[in-house]
Amino acid sequence: MNRFMRNFAYLLIPASCFLMIAAIILMAPSVEALGLKVSPLKYEEQIEPGSQKTGYVDVSNPNDGTVTVNTDVEAFRQTDIDGNLEYYEAERINKGIQFDVDQFQLAPREAARIFFAIDGSALPEGGVYAALLFSVDSEPPDEGEASSIGTTSRVGTLLILQNGDSGVRTGEISGVDVPLLQFGDGIQGNVEFTAADKARSIAFQPKLDSSLPIVGEREMDTGLVFPGNTRRFELDRTGSYIGVFPVEVTEGATGDTARSWVVAATGIWQILAPLILVVLIANLVLLRRFQKTSSLKKTAPRKKRRRS
């Protein structure tokens, strides 16, 4: 009996420790990233000075709990060559673009259409760049629970307006950085595009095409470029290429073209090219040996026959 009790105690102690650890884990508060989904992500419109328009953004809650959503409008601008944006408060933007509501609630898996008004008379003429923002603040735990810090999640729609006459959307290719030697999965490099800074210029997304001999053109992935700013875009032409040839980049609106030459052995040619080179070198060595042997046979002196 004593032996049975000892064995039971040996089993009971680890089991108790396991249950205590599990209880601590289950009681600890979980912090989940609160997120929202919005549509559309970008809104472009031209308005007449002094006119008024109304738009909307669809906001959905993919979370399991009800969330309180705050609305805000901020201006934005390009900050660097990689196209990063800076959001900031602008009085004229806040007066000219306003939401119908400052705050609203969304139940789990619920969506809502939130309207906003645009007053052209309160906005500056030319390009207007605003972010329609929606934020959710996570509530800190109640007293007595484990402490944590509340976080804020913000998503939004970029609003690009032309207040007045049609804006100027033009620029030029200011640089093509494609390394001379190309190996790997394809032809890779970077293209820099500078948007014109003229009267009535507006931020836009340029159309850039990269062109390779034989295989032809392919449109590049680009993004928003602000007037007077330069932005860098990635050139990526995945595929198997070999040889010495030019890589051309063309801007669709003006036809501006830049060129860079490459020496390439990409894709399957990374394997085939060395093999072919080894075979060629081996054949050249064998050919030289054969020629040398033939030359020695031709120049070797012949033995004279003795007359009897």
Image (cartoon, helix red, strand yellow):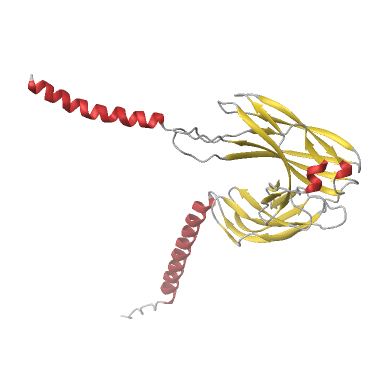
The picture places residue 11, in percent across and down from the top left corner, at 19, 26
In the figure, residue 107 lies in which quadrant?
A: top right
Image quarter where the C terminus lies is: bottom left
Q: Is residue 103 above or below residue 301?
A: above
Which residue lies at the image location 54% right of the left edge and 53% below the top edge? Answer: 184
* Furthest-top residue in this view: 1
Nearest to the observer: residue 85 or residue 152: 152
Nearest to the observer: residue 75 or residue 280: 75
Which residue lies at the image location 87% right of the left edge and 42% below the top edge? Answer: 120
Image quarter where the N terminus lies is: top left
Q: Answer with left or right where residue 111 lies relative to residue 125.
A: left
In the figure, residue 159 lies in which quadrant?
A: top right
The picture places residue 66, in percent across and down from the top left corner, at 59, 26
Nearest to the observer: residue 128 or residue 123: 123
The picture places residue 129, in percent across and down from the top left corner, at 77, 46
What is the count of numbered marks? 0
The picture places residue 149, in percent across and down from the top left corner, at 51, 41
